[in-house]
Image: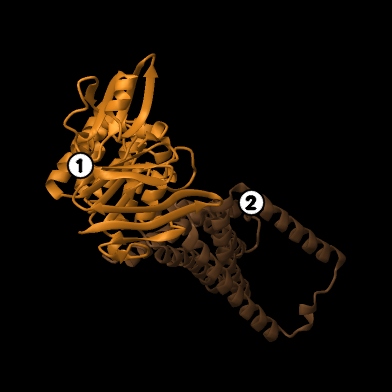
Chain colours: A brown, B orange
Amino acid sequence: MNSLLARTRKYYFLAGLKLFGYVAAVQLLLVVEWTFFGVEEEDIVGFVSQNVITFNAMFMVLFNMLFAIYGPNWYDSMVLSMGARRRDVFWGQLIKQSVFVGLSAILSIVLCVVFKHENFLGYTIVAVAAAMILGALGLVIGYKVKKYGKIVIFGLLIIVGVQAGIWGFVLATGIKLPIGSLNSAMILSLIGAGAVAVFVLLEFWAYRLNQKCMVS
Amino acid sequence: MGTLSGKNIVKKYGKDTVLKNVNIDIETGKIYGLIGRNGAGKTTLLSILTAQNPATEGTVTLDGQPVWENEEALSHICYSREIPQVTMFGPNTLKVKDYLGTAKIFYKNWDEEYAKELVGLFNLNPKKKVSKLSKGMLSALTIIIALASKADITILDEPVAGLDVVAREQFYKLVIDEYAQTGRTFIISTHIIEEAASLFEKVIIIDDGQIVLNENTEDLLSRAYRVSGEDVNVDKATDGYKVYHPESIGRNKVVTVLAEEPVAGFGEDVQVEPVALQNLFYAMCVDGRKEA
């Protein structure tokens, strides 16, 4: 374990495992709660496992972004101050996110297969794609927050608020989006290609920010 | 190990230029003192020399190789930064033992036994959260990281801030012992100059983003004098020398002189005393050089 890259990878790999552990622990508590709520359900195992799959996907997306936002302040400064290179930190962040998202996805897929919820496999795959994209976005936001402070968070809240308003309006008025007229294979291909493109662009942006960020 | 060298370093934060074309050579195997006023650019300079932060202009090399993103160069350097008390990020989210565990991952030559010994010496509780440590304990933690890293070039920024006198003396002794045993290079930035002065083989004075001095401490002090007497006599005796911080009390005057070479005498009409490093620094930085 002499190479700096290997040591940095180990650090971020362990960080990813730790974050997955925290989220898994929260879900275990929820499992206990759902078990109590589901006593009157016909298929309590099915009820609880479906809830775990649904929430696990949501948590995967939500927490991967949150942990990414914290990254530049929480991990990177400290690691850089201990002699890590910026490129190692960049790859380390990717490793951390991949470990967290990967393990969450494995958990969901195993539950889908074991408890016969195969209809949720597609949902899980979309969640994985969303988690990786929002993770990259979270990293960019994290660098901006580190540089400019809380003003970035307020700006983001406004943007998210406006988007939520638009989506709410679309749902309330029943406006059909043009995407509905495309066939499902084309939609999936378009979404897949778009997701990859957005992910690469955001990671590239995060890399550029990583090269300039300050250790504080 | 050869020389850690910074050439033409400029650092700008927006419109503020914090470092103004700094050139510096750090010869390895010496203990350096880096002194300067608050905001003079000490921390910025150290963070650029160790590639923790990018310079706006200029290059930093170790033995001729760039330090930036260079694993080989970085493996020889430890810059143990001050840990701020009031953030909710980084080390402050960890327990002492976890922070030391992180350092163990990143410093190639980390000495675990020595780290444990130092934790005991400074009475640090490994299970305590870093955010719960006092200012002095935070300083002790940065000292432990620096010393146990066993890095060839070890840099400490304000290591004794908040430490009591016993802990400060322990720190000075530890540095001397380490230096005697390993010949590591230490760069220590401090405001408690008088106490640490005997530690410094070389001293670097930075003022307003520029290196004012970088030389052997003994040589420097051997050509620094405090000259006092009647103002006319003082002016006459110090004519042609670099004179700093003249102070007049009635018809008497006191000046600090930094000559090019040791001076045999300033004449019978004035009193001459040696100058301590702290007083020389004060004279040089308080209001700049008045005459030449």
Three-letter amino acid code at the position of disc 2: Ile
Three-letter amino acid code at the position of disc 1: Glu
User: Where's residue B231, x and y in %?
Assistant: 34, 20
Q: Nearer the viewer, residue B47 or B164?
A: B47
Disc 2 is attached to a residue of which chain? A
Q: Nearer the viewer, residue B211 or B255?
A: B255
Q: Nearer the viewer, mark 2 or mark 1?
A: 1
User: Where's residue A67, x and y in %?
Assistant: 52, 56
Q: In the displayed structure, would residue A75 be above or below residue B115? A: below
Q: Quadrant of residue B242?
A: top left
User: Where's residue B68, x and y in %?
Assistant: 37, 63
Q: Residue at x 74, y 61 (%)?
A: A163
User: Where's residue B12, x and y in %?
Assistant: 50, 52
- Mark 2 vs 1: CB contact within 8 A: no
Q: Which mark is residue A153?
A: 2
Q: Which residue is mark 1?
A: B201
Relative to residue A156, is residue A178 drawn left or right? right
Q: Nearer the viewer, residue B205 or A56?
A: B205
Q: Residue at x 19, y 50 (%)?
A: B184
**Name of the residue lying farthest toward the right:** A173
Relative to residue A167, is residue A127 drawn left or right? left
Position of the C terminus of chain B by quadrant: top left
